[in-house]
């Protein structure tokens, strides 16, 4: 992972405006699901302990139950680890000139893309459901006409504020480009 003070392809006057990660509740809901998936078989095991202890003493059924329980527990742990890695390493950086999207896909696949603010056509915030509304998190979609047509900021806090900030930065960037074009035309006419 790179440091914010050493952005790749950094422009001289570029500065980081926002560094975003997913909202903590997205990870907490996954943890709750994992605890539930571990607690239900444990509760069933405690309730039927007399029968299960007899099965565990059987020379064939006992090892199968132990191996199955271990595989089940390790599978839940692995899924949680993969999801946490995806949660923690999915980042979005908004600067005064561009949007950088770093997306973790699985354990060993990472895609980093950047989008210049000048090509942004539309920015949309999307908050669905009671929980997302209560905790004020959701998705922000940045639409362009470029090759990668849409950047999606998943489960970020305050999506409406992020949307407004991106729109403001896009307008500032377009004004800066227009001013440079006018300055270039004026300088070009002096050269003639």
Image: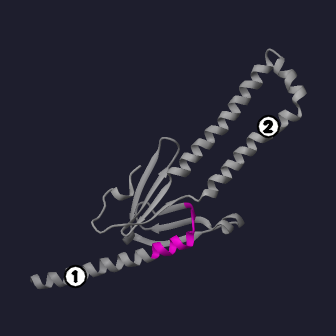
User: Which residue in the structure is indicated by mark 1?
Assistant: 183
**Residue shown at 62%/52% (left/top)?**
27
Numbered tag placed on residue 7 in the rendering: none
Q: Mark 1: which secondary structure?
A: helix
Left or right, residue 114 beside residue 134:
left
Is residue 121 visible to the viewer in this orientation of the structure? Answer: yes
Left or right, residue 80 beside residue 42:
left
Q: Position of residue 71 (x, y in %)?
A: 68, 30
For label 2, count other residues whose C-alpha is less than 10 Å away and answer few (under 14), some (14-19) or many (20+). Answer: some
Q: Mark 2: which secondary structure?
A: helix
| Quadrant for the C terminus in the image | bottom left
Q: Give, as a single range, the part of the protein colored magenta.
A: 154-167
Q: Position of residue 138 (x, y in %)?
A: 60, 65
Determine the residue located farthest toward the top in the rendered image.
59
Numbered tag placed on residue 41 in the rendering: 2
Magenta stretch: includes residue 163: yes
Q: Nearer the viewer, mark 2 or mark 1?
A: 2
For label 1, count other residues whose C-alpha is less than 10 Å away and answer few (under 14), some (14-19) or many (20+). Answer: few
**160 is higher (above) or lower (below) than 75:** below
**120 is higher (above) or lower (below) than 79:** below
**Residue shown at 68%/53% (left/top)?**
29
Magenta stretch: includes residue 23: no
> Going from the N terminus, do you reach mark 2 or mark 1 first?
2
Q: Quadrant of residue 65?
A: top right
């Amino acid at each position: 992972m790179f440091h914010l003070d050493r952005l790749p392809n950094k422009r001289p006057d570029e500065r980081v405006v926002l560094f975003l990660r997913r909202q903590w509740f997205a990870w907490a809901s996954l943890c709750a699901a994992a605890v539930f998936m571990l607690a239900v078989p444990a509760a069933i095991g405690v309730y039927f302990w007399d029968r299960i202890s007899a099965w565990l003493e059987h020379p064939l059924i006992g090892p199968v139950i132990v191996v199955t329980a271990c595989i089940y527990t390790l599978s839940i742990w692995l899924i949680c680890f993969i999801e946490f890695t995806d949660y923690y390493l999915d980042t979005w950086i908004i600067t005064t000139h561009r949007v950088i999207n770093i997306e973790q896909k699985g354990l060993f696949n990472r895609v980093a893309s950047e989008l210049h603010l000048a090509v942004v056509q539309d920015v949309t915030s999307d908050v669905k459901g009671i929980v997302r509304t209560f905790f004020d998190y959701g998705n922000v979609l940045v639409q362009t006409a470029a090759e990668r047509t849409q950047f999606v900021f998943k489960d970020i806090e305050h999506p409406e504020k992020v949307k407004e900030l991106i729109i403001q930065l896009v307008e500032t960037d377009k004004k800066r480009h227009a001013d440079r074009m006018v300055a270039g035309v004026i300088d070009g006419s002096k050269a003639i």
